[in-house]
Amino acid sequence: MAESFPPSSIQTSLFTHILYAFVEIDPSSYELTISQSDQILMTNFTSTLHSKSPPPPKLFLSIGGGGSNASAFATMSSNPTTRTKSIASTIKSARDHNFDGLDLDWEFPQTPGKMSNLATLLQEWRGEPPVGIHRHQSHNAPALHRRLLRLQLHPLAGGSFLRRRRGSQRCCSIKRATSVPDTGSGRGSGSGRQPSIVSG
């Protein structure tokens, strides 16, 4: 996809947010699994899009997706130690590759207990100070510690998913899944062809 439609081809004036999707959490370490090719693509993605005419869109690193390991999310979110480890990994990866925020796409918490663990995960994720800065120091570096978090909640019993947004945000995702854009609705059709931009 990156070869056929590089980040430089994106008309950024149409979007407030653009997502790089997806990276996954390792089911053993609960840290993000990022391949060498993804590291190269992400660096190109953020450097190219941040250089677009101002104001550039906010760039999010999207974690999970429809093909991700849902049980890894469930196990990670159920334990304070693994939550802390995973949160630190996501923040470090986002900062290392110059993303503005993080997007969580867990498909999906299927029980009240898992939903409760998700709420705890988000609360801790939101409150975690930036990597390398102690909690009591974070107020001294406001531009460094403010993070944007985005959550996609997919259907628990059928029905459409809810994506939490503010104001008139317009998003698109750079997908690495096997889907193509639907010119009518702007969402992937799952035809098995190479991925492209999916608007939402």
Image (cartoon, grey):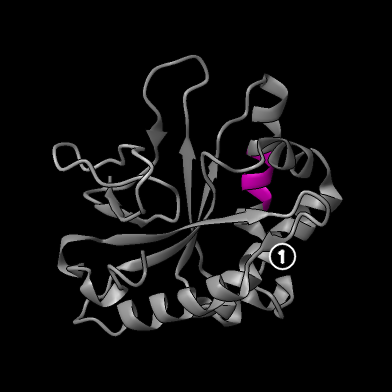
Magenta stretch, overall SS? helix
Q: Amino acid at mark 1?
A: Ala
User: Residue 58 placed where, x, y %?
Assistant: 35, 67
Q: Quadrant of the N terminus?
A: bottom left
Q: Which residue is mark 1?
A: 88
State left or right for residue 54 relative to residue 107.
left
Residue 100 vs residue 195, the one in the foreground:
195
Residue drawn at 47 percent across, 64 percent down: 101
State left or right for residue 41 relative to residue 88.
left
Residue 17 found in image quarter:
bottom left
Residue 35 found in image quarter:
bottom right
Residue drawn at 68 percent across, 45 percent down: 121
Residue 110 vs residue 23, the one in the foreground:
23
Q: Answer above or below: position of 37 versus 78.
A: below
Q: Quadrant of the C terminus?
A: top left
Examine the rendering and report whether any part of residue 98 can be seen: no
User: Residue 89 placed where, x, y %?
Assistant: 70, 65
Highlighted range, magenta: 119-124
State left or right for residue 39 relative to residue 177.
right
Q: Answer above or below: position of 187 versus 137.
A: above
Q: Could you say whether the residue bearing mark 1 is in a helix, strand or loop?
A: helix
Residue 123 inside the magenta-drawn segment: yes
Examine the rendering and report whether any part of residue 193 can be seen: yes
